[in-house]
Image: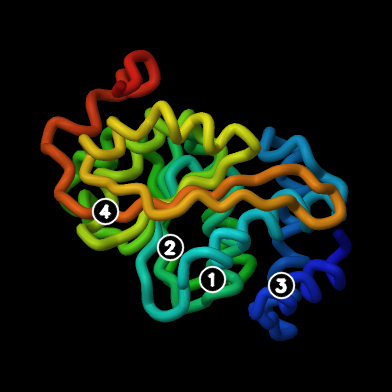
Amino acid sequence: MNPEQFVSALQAKGITLNQQQIDQFAAYYRILVEWNEKMNLTALTEEQDVYLKHFYDSVTAAFYVDLNGEKTICDVGAGAGFPSIPLKICFPDLAVTIVDSLKKRIGFLNHLASELGLTGVAFYHDRAETFGKNQKFRQTFDVVTARAVARMSVLSELCLPLVKKNGTFIAMKGSQGEEEMAEAHNAIELLGGSLKDVHTFYLPSEDSERTIITIDKVRQTPKKYPRKPGTPNKQPLE
């Protein structure tokens, strides 16, 4: 998918990019490739791959959840900024918070935001388990998202504590999404969530399967969650 095809594909989904936004994506690609020579941000560096498998793939979240208006979104384990920075470019009114456990990546994101002229973005070097216990952030976000970070039962414990009541958790998965969902039902309910939808689709031109799971936050998350760093991964909720 080249930049022109990317713009057309989003247009077909009702997302129209202006020239500034098109330029921001071009700069994002250039900066990502530059920094990737110094640190491992992505295995994909070809323009067609980045535009399809990172940029377009990130924006697919907006096909299923309305991100218009001044919503707050927290991206857990965003790595090189996916999906929240492409979403921020497309929806400039979003207030984006990214939490990532690697300090170098936070350095990259700060540089990226400055170069792209993004405002209303905040980056935190922290473990998701610790961040989710912080009263300043706990249960304050309209939307919490994560893309390919951990299995659904683990991811729910990292993300749902950050979602405000009546907010939405968006889990972006590959082909295994529905299977993971089956084993995570109890954990999601325990953490105050309720499954809304499971959307399965294929990336254009490449036909690789993707799953987007949307979960409504219907109750407060019990105070004991998330458990201490490392525990959700070692002992997933059943």
- CB within 8 Å, label 1 to label 2: yes
Mark 1 vs mark 3: in front: 3
Q: Which residue is mark 1?
A: 118
Residue 40, image x, y percentages: 68, 33
Q: Which residue is mark 3?
A: 10
Q: Which residue is mark 2?
A: 96
Nearest to N terminus: mark 4 or mark 2: 2
Mark 4–mark 1 Cα distance, whole angstroms, equals 29 Å
Q: Give the residue drawn at x 24%, y 62%.
A: 166
The quadrant of the picture occupied by the N terminus is bottom right
Tell me the element at label 2.
strand
Amino acid type of the residue that numbered disc 4 sits on in the rendered structure? Lys
- In the image, is 134 to the left or to the right of 97? left
Q: On screen, 25 above or below 134?
A: below
Mark 4 vs mark 2: in front: 4
Nearest to N terminus: mark 3 or mark 2: 3
Q: Which residue is mark 4?
A: 217
Nearer to us in this view, 136 or 184 = 184
